[in-house]
């Protein structure tokens, strides 16, 4: 019996994303969906972790994202990559969560008007920031575009499709984001080049 | 290669490092268990919906038959009495049963969370 199970698992591992999605759509195959989760979770969790700057929150959101993907998998059309569809859902989950948190924070501030957030970007930037810390200095849109474009290797058009931003804006966000990162990480990068 | 280009290349290289250090097995187990729980709950709600619908239908049968009694005498005089009698006896209860059974299933199962 365990042999059958492991054989089935390895068979699923050999299938492409489209075939696995078809199995989930037509048969409701949970094992196929689990294989898809195994295959794409790092991308989704990494993307969300960079946006949230909190790994635990990113993992919770990633779970929600995969549940939504399972619920709406019937709507997936294989015109683009499955991972880009997942990232689209992940971005929406993040924005929804952010909206929820900010509305809660607004309510909370009504009772605590003296509490202020000092973690703003107007502080003196520590020159020794690493890449992940440097991303906190970028705008949300710049982080999304840079992560999708460089870390995940999507083209500008695909980034525009996933993020929902116009193509021109995507290019601008990438350029300004890269400029900011270059400025923030200049000493480290120069040091690395010299080594 | 100029200094600026070298810095740029190094930045792009740093950016292109893929995400790692994620426990994929544990995460996929968690998602799988949540998916199976979601499916179980969906079936539970659907079956409760169907059972409620059936119960309401059978409870309403006596009420329907007394309500439809005066209609029978009126329909008997009509030219298409047989057809209309069948319609009143089958169409109305069928509509009620469909509404009572499908509505809870529709309300429970397919509400998207992301708009």
Image (spheres, coloured by chain):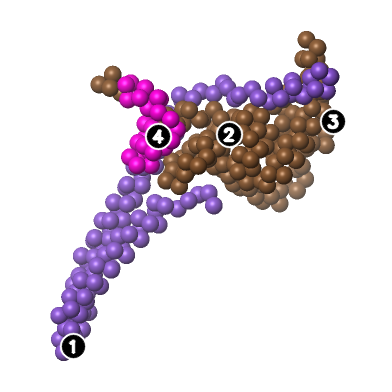
Chain colours: A brown, B purple
Q: Which mark is residue A58?
A: 2
Measured as percent of width and height from the top left, residue A123 is found at: 83, 33
Distance from label 1 to label 3 (Cα)?
A: 90 Å
Q: Kindly check if marks 3 and 2 are in contact, taking CB atoms under 8 A apart as contact.
A: no
Q: Residue at x 71, y 51 (%)?
A: A110
Measured as percent of width and height from the top left, residue B37 is found at: 38, 39
| First reached walking from the N terminus: tag 2 or tag 4 | 4
B109 displayed left or right of B77: right
Residue A10 forms part of the magenta stretch? yes
- Secondary structure at numbered mark 2: helix
Q: Nearer the viewer, residue A156 or A99?
A: A156
Instruction: Tell me which chain the residue with mark 1 is part of.
Output: B
Distance from label 2 to label 4 (Cα)?
A: 28 Å
| First reached walking from the N terminus: tag 4 or tag 3 | 4
Q: Which mark is residue A19?
A: 4
- Secondary structure at numbered mark 4: helix
B88 displayed left or right of B109: left
Q: Which mark is residue B78?
A: 1
Callouts 2 and 4 in the same chain: yes
Q: Which residues are magenta?
A: A6-32
- Secondary structure at numbered mark 3: loop
Distance from label 4 to label 3 (Cα)?
A: 51 Å
């Amino acid at each position: 019996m365990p042999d059958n199970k492991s054989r089935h698992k390895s068979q699923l591992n050999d299938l492409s994303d489209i075939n696995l999605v078809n199995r989930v759509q037509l048969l409701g195959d949970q094992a196929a969906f689990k294989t898809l989760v195994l295959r794409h979770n790092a991308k989704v969790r990494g993307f969300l972790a960079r946006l949230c700057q909190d790994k635990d929150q990113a993992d919770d959101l990633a779970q929600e994202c995969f549940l939504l993907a399972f619920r709406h998998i019937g709507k997936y059309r294989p015109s683009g990559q499955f991972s880009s569809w997942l990232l689209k859902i992940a971005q929406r989950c993040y924005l929804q969560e952010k909206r929820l948190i900010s509305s809660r924070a607004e309510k909370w501030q009504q009772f605590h008007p003296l509490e202020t957030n000092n973690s703003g970007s107007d502080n003196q930037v520590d020159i020794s920031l690493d890449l992940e810390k440097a991303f906190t200095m970028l705008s949300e849109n710049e982080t999304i575009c840079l992560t999708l474009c460089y870390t995940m290797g999507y083209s500008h058009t695909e980034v525009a499709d996933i993020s929902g931003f116009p193509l021109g804006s995507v290019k601008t966000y990438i350029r300004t984001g890269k400029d900011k990162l270059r400025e923030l990480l200049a000493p480290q990068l120069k040091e690395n080049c010299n080594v | 290669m100029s200094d600026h280009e070298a810095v740029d290349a190094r930045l792009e290289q740093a950016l292109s490092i893929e995400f790692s250090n994620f426990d994929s097995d544990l995460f996929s187990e968690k998602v799988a268990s949540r998916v199976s729980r979601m499916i179980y709950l969906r079936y539970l709600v659907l079956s409760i919906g169907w059972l409620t619908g059936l119960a309401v239908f059978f409870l309403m049968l006596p009420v329907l038959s007394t309500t439809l009694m005066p209609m029978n005498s009126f329909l008997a005089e009509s030219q298409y009495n047989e057809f209309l009698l069948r319609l009143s006896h089958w169409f109305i209860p069928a509509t009620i049963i469909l509404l009572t059974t499908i509505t809870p299933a529709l309300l429970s199962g397919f509400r998207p969370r992301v708009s």
